[in-house]
Image: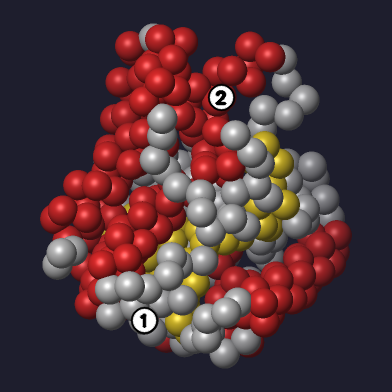
Amino acid sequence: MIHEGFGNKKLSVPETVSGESSIDKEELSEQSQDFSIESDSNQVEQAARFLGDETVVEIRRIVSELHESIGKMLEPVLEKIENGEFQLLIGDDTSGRIPALIVRKIINVAYENTGRPKIPTHFIAGTSIHSNKEGLSLKELELGVAKKEAEISAYIAELKTESSLNISDALIVTEFIESGEGLIPVIKALQGNNITPVILTTNINSYKVARAMETELNVPLVSYGKKSPVPPSLFDKKDLSGVAKHYFDLHAKPIRLGISEDERKMILAKMTIARDEADRVADKLVAELLLT
């Protein structure tokens, strides 16, 4: 989510997310270019039995809601995608992880159709003082944010240096933009490394926010699926993304660490169903949007 305070460009705390193995390698790893949202049918069946019909239906409802908005937000960039004009995909964790994975699959199908390599995908999260649950002082927040902004810039620079691609254009995918403030460090880091960012969001607070981001931050396009001050159902569903953020950490942490085995199984089961439904959404959008 992108939080309030668009004008306060120093008051956001972006973070990156590390990956894991097994089930989590596909859903959680931003470093591996091979992870996907495709799931094993046996895992899905086991997860469904573990969770029960009511929970499975609700998870599928939440994820399937993304279908229409992702389709609409992609329309303005479809031609560029089919022409292979984006060399980097950044997902805005944590709630933006599932939309980013859906977009990633669509792009990779388009790229595969034209013989291009998969698009490198990474996750960077934005946090602001409005979620200051620990009661940090303004000075502490500003110092932490300044340090984080420098780390993001270095992170993007390293990605560009190590990539075999000539990275000049990137997509940033998120699920809800309230004001745009939380994306500023990522946008600046990309621009500072001569990478042009285009922002895709399933929901946005208002048309004015999109236009302000384009004019004030020099972003060529902020494309959105729905215009509403109400976040999508996916917002803040950490148990579906599998990760949670903390102030100033470089990596978000898997939320199943430090919890009981039963809680861990519950989270893994929910992630499996969410991933399976995301794969369904992606397949539908591929059929609807791409010129195959």
The answer to whether residue 173 is left or right of residue 31 is left
Query: Image point 75% across, 57% down: which residue?
Result: 250
In the visual, does 5 lie left or right of 74? right
Marks 2 and 1 sit apart, C-alpha to C-alpha, by 36 Å
Q: What residue is shown at x 36% (from left), y 62% (from top)?
A: 108
The residue labelled by disc 2 is 267
Against 64, is 198 above or below? below
Q: Amino acid at mark 1?
A: Glu
Residue type, numbered disc 2: Ile
Specify the label residue 173 is tagged with.
none
Please tell me which residue lies in front, 217 or 85. 85
In this view, the residue in front, 82 or 62, is 82
Residue 283 percent location from the top left of the image: 24, 47
The x and y percentages for residue 135 are 80, 45
Q: Quadrant of residue 76?
A: bottom left
Q: Please tell me which residue is depicted at 30% across the width and 20% down the height of the picture.
A: 57
* SS type, badge 1: loop
The tag earlier along the polypeptide, 2 or 1, is 1
Q: Which residue is mark 1?
A: 85
